[in-house]
Image: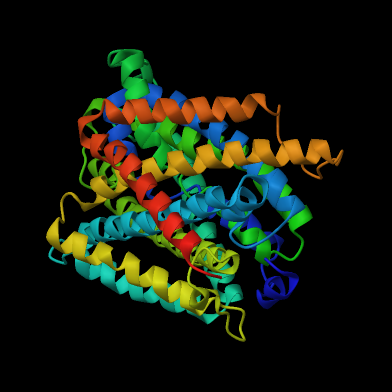
């Protein structure tokens, strides 16, 4: 991206915005809704699963962080792959990330419908999805500072809610008000910490990965940060502590309050558990919180989707019209294009109200695998160039290149797990089809005169 194009984006995202955007990308539907499936597969050992996935995410974020601190540009993944690898890698990385975020938007919209039905079961999923679809796109079209303030507000609610839930859950356990079935011994008394063996934990890892989709949003926001060399490293380094507190700590309390083998699907397990304990008021508040979390992730992901499409347009890998930016610094054409495609979610929830979320979740995981593998491999190319130039990075990654290969091997393992999971196999089957489509699209683009 040229300096003139970069200046068109408003550098309005402050340190507090970046910190909360980083947090907002890692706390959403994967924790509040998808966790019920991972608990059924792995039991209490799901705590270990989230810690392992969090460590891999941290390695990947440090790799991304090293690149974006050196060059804070819009469409970061695609830009780096294009510059340090080759044009096709940039094309593939950018379009895959765009599709990934569109799928995440769809999944979050589907989850919103499930949360709304806790209060008003008569409202169809597609109606709720449509309402919030319109609201969030209006916010993203206003001004980047409006987006930042809204995301800041949503993330504050999530932080306070999780801290409050951990505190309230700990109080219930310590005081004995949680009932006879509530005890820390639930973590090992019902078949052990690994009730379904190591195999159960391994099979849960693919779904656990869904929880971390979007954590890389902080890299996209770097182009509109006021002081990226200061704010980005701080935000990334704090991610690992947040994962330990918000994921591991929350699940520890959750599984202590309620037997893991009785957690039902069909809504947020957090809401259902507090509801079953007789805390209807707390359950109602929690449902509002998880609804806010889903809206927050959808808001942030919509932002990331438009900025990636903007970056592709500026590289010449997408129609030039998608690179238009208005006087407020908003890439309105990219936002509207992404919104039109995301609207397919409303149709999916109308046609398949009971299956839309699970289908979208499996497709998201496949796209995450491609994205994270491309990111780690691109970082290797970036690092080789830096070493060749004898240039020292401002924010170097951890244990290069060992952690890069660890991330790649982990992602290949996730694909193997998905292939052995009947409900997710279709998502793996579609990966080569998707890559062939990208290669064909790039070949057509390459034939066109500039």
Closer-to-camera residue (160/335): 335
Res. 181 visible in picture? no
Q: Residue at 69% across / 64% down in the picture?
A: 225
Percent position of residue 301, x then y = 46, 59
Q: Is residue 145 visible?
A: yes
The percent position of residue 320, horizontal first and vertical second, equals: 52, 75
User: Residue 276, position in %: x, y?
Assistant: 23, 41
71 displayed left or right of 420: right
Q: Position of residue 27 (x, y in %)?
A: 47, 48
Placement of the N terminus among the 4 image quadrants: bottom right
Residue at 74% of width from left, 36% of height from top? 384
Q: Where is 366 relative to 51, above or below? A: below
Q: 205 and 305: which one is in front?
A: 305
Q: Is residue 51 left or right of residue 121?
A: right
Instruction: Tell which of 148 and 270 is nearer to you.
Output: 148
Give the image quarter of residue 131: bottom left
Image position of 371 (left or right of 228): left
Across the whole image, how many numbered discs are drawn on residues?
0
Q: Residue at x 61, y 42 (%)?
A: 239
Residue 139, placed above or below residue 443: below
Q: Quadrant of the image for the C terminus? A: bottom right
Q: Residue at x 58, y 26 (%)?
A: 405
Q: How is the image coloured?
A: rainbow
């Amino acid at each position: 991206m040229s300096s003139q194009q970069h200046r068109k984006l408003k550098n309005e995202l402050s340190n507090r915005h970046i910190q909360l955007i980083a947090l907002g990308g890692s706390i959403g539907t994967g924790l509040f809704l998808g966790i019920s499936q991972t608990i059924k597969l792995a039991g209490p050992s799901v705590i270990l699963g989230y810690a392992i996935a969090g460590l891999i995410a941290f390695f990947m974020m440090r790799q991304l962080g090293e690149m974006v601190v050196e060059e804070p540009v819009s469409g970061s993944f695609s830009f780096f792959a294009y510059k340090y690898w080759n044009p096709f890698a940039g094309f593939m990385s950018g379009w895959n990330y765009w599709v990934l975020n569109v799928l995440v938007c769809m999944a979050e919209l589907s989850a919103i419908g499930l949360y709304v039905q806790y209060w008003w079961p008569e409202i169809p999923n597609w109606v709720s999805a449509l309402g919030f679809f319109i609201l969030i796109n209006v916010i993203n079209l206003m001004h980047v500072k409006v987006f930042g303030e809204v995301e800041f507000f949503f993330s504050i609610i999530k932080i306070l809610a999780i801290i409050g839930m951990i505190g309230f859950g700990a109080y219930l356990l310590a005081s004995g008000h949680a009932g006879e079935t509530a005890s820390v011994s639930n973590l090992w008394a019902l078949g052990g910490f690994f009730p379904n063996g190591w195999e159960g934990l391994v099979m849960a890892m693919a779904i656990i990965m869904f929880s971390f989709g979007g954590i890389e949003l902080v890299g996209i926001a770097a182009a509109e940060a006021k002081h990226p060399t200061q704010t980005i490293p701080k935000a990334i380094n704090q991610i690992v502590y947040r994962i330990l507190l918000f994921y591991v700590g929350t699940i520890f309390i959750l599984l202590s309050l309620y037997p893991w083998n009785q957690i039902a699907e069909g809504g947020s397990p957090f809401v259902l558990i507090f509801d079953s304990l007789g805390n209807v008021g707390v359950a109602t508040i929690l449902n509002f919180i998880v609804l806010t979390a889903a809206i927050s992730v959808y808001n942030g992901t919509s932002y990331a989707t438009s900025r990636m499409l903007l970056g592709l347009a500026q590289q010449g890998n997408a129609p030039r019209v998608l690179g238009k930016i208005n006087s407020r610094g908003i890439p309105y054409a990219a936002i509207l294009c992404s919104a039109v495609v995301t609207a397919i979610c409303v149709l999916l929830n109308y046609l398949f109200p009971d299956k839309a979320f699970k289908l979208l979740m499996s497709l998201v995981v496949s796209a995450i695998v491609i994205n994270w593998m491309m990111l780690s491999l691109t970082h290797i190319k970036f690092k080789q160039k830096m070493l060749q130039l004898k240039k020292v990075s401002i924010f170097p990654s951890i244990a290069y290149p060992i952690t890069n290969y660890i991330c790649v091997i982990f992602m290949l393992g996730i694909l193997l797990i998905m292939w052995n999971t009947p409900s997710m196999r279709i998502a793996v089957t579609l990966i080569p089809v998707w890559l062939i489509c990208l290669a064909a699209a790039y070949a057509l683009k390459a034939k066109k005169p500039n």
